[in-house]
Amino acid sequence: MKNPLLPLRSLHPTIKVPRRRYAALSSGVLGKLNVPTDYSASSYLAHTSSQTYRLHTDLPEQIRSSKTKRTNYFTAVNDALRTILTTDDKSLIFGEDVSFGGVFRCTSNLTDSFGSSRIFNTPLSEQGIIGFAIGLSASGYTALPEIQFADYLFPAFDQLHNEASKMRYRSGGAEIFNAGRMVVRMPTSAVGHGGLYHSQSPEGFFLGMQGITVVIPRSPVQAKGLLIAAARGEDPVVIMEPKTLYRAAVEEVPLEEYELPIGKAEVLQAGTDVTLVTYGTMVYVAESAARAAKERLGVSVEVIDLRTVRPWDKETITKSVNKTGRCVVVHEASRTGGVGESLAGEVQERCFLRLEAPVTRVTGWDTPMPLAFEGFMVPDVVRVLDGIKRTMEY
Amino acid sequence: MVLLASSRASAWARVSRIRLPPPPNTARHFASSVIARQNAPMKQPPHSNSVLFPGAVNSKFTNELKFQRPQDLPAIPTYRLIDTHGQVVDKSREPDVGQELALKMYKDMVTTSIMDLLMYESQRQGRISFYMVSAGEEGIAVGSAAALAPDDVIFSQYREQGVMMYRGFTLDEFMNQLFANKFDYGKGRNMPIHYMSERLHMHPISSPLATQIPHSVGAAYALKLDQSSRIVVCFFGEGAASEGDFHAALNIAATRSCPVVFICRNNGFAISTPTLEQYKGDGIASRGVGYGIDTARVDGNDIMAVREVTMRARDIALKEQKPVLIEAMSYRVSHHSTSDDSFAYRAKIEVEDWKRRDNPITRMRKWLESKSWWSSEQDQELRTQVRKDILKAFARAEKEKKPALENLFLDVFKIPSRDLEEQMTELRRVIEEYPDEYDLEAFDRGKEGL
């Protein structure tokens, strides 16, 4: 069959393909569409002040005259934590290695400013960290525990699933006896060389935790606003920060404090032919795939960042799919047990009569995350574009 | 109907964690007699001076109310044979080691340390993706390995390359894993330093901390059931000992009397977290006592002391069929890993001081020289040769292909599920449909490898 997508050369004439030097990274992905994301060229990141207010449409009115500063993702998280600590006397940060700034530098300089009774290292025990956080929360304190990698959350599953997620329910909706003042932060997703235990995307496991909200911010502006909102909210929140974005994603972030809405998706790019729903690092892959779809297939893609993956925004997604009639879901996590299953299920129930094609999922495979094949596990631009094409041609 | 309901109820009572009195009309004679036997009070004569509660049968009554204060107990001493100058401390207790074995131990430590240096540097050059050195801890690894039988079973964390070196894991085997090439036993799926060897009875290393500790206890129980003459040895760091898995493991090992030797490498740091923030008690050793486990603490820089303690521990574990805990003290001279810069949380001078003060390799070399078993010329020669050998293995491994792409999907199950077969087909379709986008040259069998 003649492939209408070829040739695809010179799609990114300005991007030099860096020679991948990590031996373990030889994903073999050297083609023209599958080039490493150039975040400095992404239209989803605000490279100027005015872009900040234009791109991030739900930034509150009252801060829209605030000055902005070029800030990377981990510094935006740090800013948010600083804001929370400053405005909430009862807030604390703790976890493994957070005192000196954490292994991803998100808690840098906080000990100096707020003291070691509010920012401190815990012994190396995730179940201890989350259990401790629940106890603080159920005593009126705001607990901001850090789990060093999402891959290492699992010893704390009992605390998170059996305790935090059910505590409000179990206590009959008690005012204090709940885990609502807890925000668990953890780095997540692939870095290209993390392998089995440093590149997982375990968000699917939270889909079965009934009282937990799960947020995956895509950018510095988003990370700051969503974290502050989570800390001031009334339910336990897990914030998963795509670790590959900590240094790579840089944008102009408002200096003033602000909240962004939890539970709400955001349309990053309006389109008419197909709705592409994703979150985290994958929004940038989606951006490239959407551009290629426009240029090569003449397809107009509406790209939506879910932002909150549990409970996700049914209204925004339904509205979009009812408009386009087609839906592609993209995530790094494995196909089975992932957010895509939940999305595909709901979309077919809610938009059945408008669907022109089955909901397509482009996801990680149903395998662990293997080091040598990480580049084949994580959806790339080609696979997303291919998903769009198949959906259009159905 | 009644019968059905009541038998359900008694079954429920047996599995529930909360023991309720059995409901009426149940098979009472069964359920209650089992519970009665388990919880029977111990017979206690009147005016007895001991408690005889089932939970603490050796405790005596006292009229003095006194809390046990940890600081009132002496710290568990640290055993050593050779001091930092390489001198035997107690002349009547010369290490029981011949020249050949001593030199093997020394050479394995040196090889480990040179491999560490070279591989650390190669990560800095972008040749491998990650590395962790064991600088300062070679004595614990090699010393303990030298005390074991070749078929004892090993579970390790990620800083025990010296154990593998001693057991005969070849430089090629190390390099194949580090480069995730097609000869890597883990098929390129793991990050570097996650070694394994079925041949050498060394279970595959996993990144999550402490998960291997309960595994080792289960494996030890299997040996016990087999009436084997082998034991299990499990390595971990003092940071990992904060995980729940450590506590669960020691408790099960003690209650089921499993022939396992736990070796904790206490190197002072869990990434940036110093032991002062990791625990309050007397190291990890004091916990062994709490779990009812024979315990010793040893100077980890004294390879002969490590060997002797491990040999004795092995004896106890094997002959008495019970667990033993060894806490081996050292100092993590290196950064945690290539992803870490430890000078962000500790002073360089502190590290330099330690390096100058003591090091298992220099200590052993001084001892060897004092026995005229080794000279600085031999040392230089050894180091040059080892460096050459490592670089040769390095070059061989680096140019090997990655494992075939099918290995992305294999071994999830013994036989790939239908789902996985479908997904393999899907990836193959994408690669065939977009040939310019995927270069599979680096992988074994290229496009045919899927």
Image: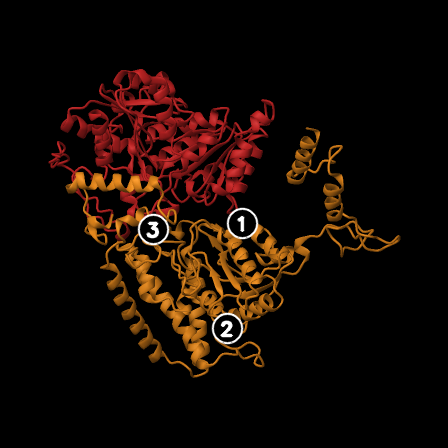
Image position of B346 (left or right of A61): right
Rendered colour, chain B = orange
Residue shown at 75%/51% (left/top)? B54
Using residue A108 as the reference point, say whether residue A22 is left or right of it.
Answer: left
Q: Disc 2 marks which residue?
A: B304
Task: Return the mark for residue B245.
Answer: 1
Residue B218 horizontal/vertical position (percent): 54, 55
- Mark 2: which secondary structure? helix
User: The numbered mark 1 sits on a residue in which chain?
Assistant: B
Residue B151 x, y percent position in the rendering: 47, 68
Which colour style is shown?
Answer: by chain
> Closer to us: mark 2 or mark 1?
1
Image check: B393 left or right of A30?
right
Pointer 2 or 1: first along the chain: 1
Could you classify mark 1 by the number of other residues whose Cα lies within 10 Å: few (under 14), some (14-19), or many (20 or more)?
A: many
The answer to whether residue B407 is left or right of residue A127 is: left
Distance, label 2 to label 1, CA atoms, is: 30 Å
Q: Residue furthest bottom?
A: B372
**Which chain is represented by red in the image?**
A
Residue type beneath disc 3: Arg
The residue lying toward the viewer, choosing from A342 and B60, is A342
Q: Chain of mark 3?
A: B
Please name the residue shown 45% across and 65% down the image: B141
Query: Is residue A149 in view from this perspective?
Result: no
State how far apart marks 1 and 3 are (Cα). 24 Å
Residue denoted by label 3:
B189
- Identify the residue at the far right of this view: B46
Which is nearer the N-term, disc 3 or disc 2?
3
State the quadrant of the N terminus of chain B: top right
Give the mark nearest the N terminus, 1 or 3: 3
- The local secondary structure at tag 1 comes to helix
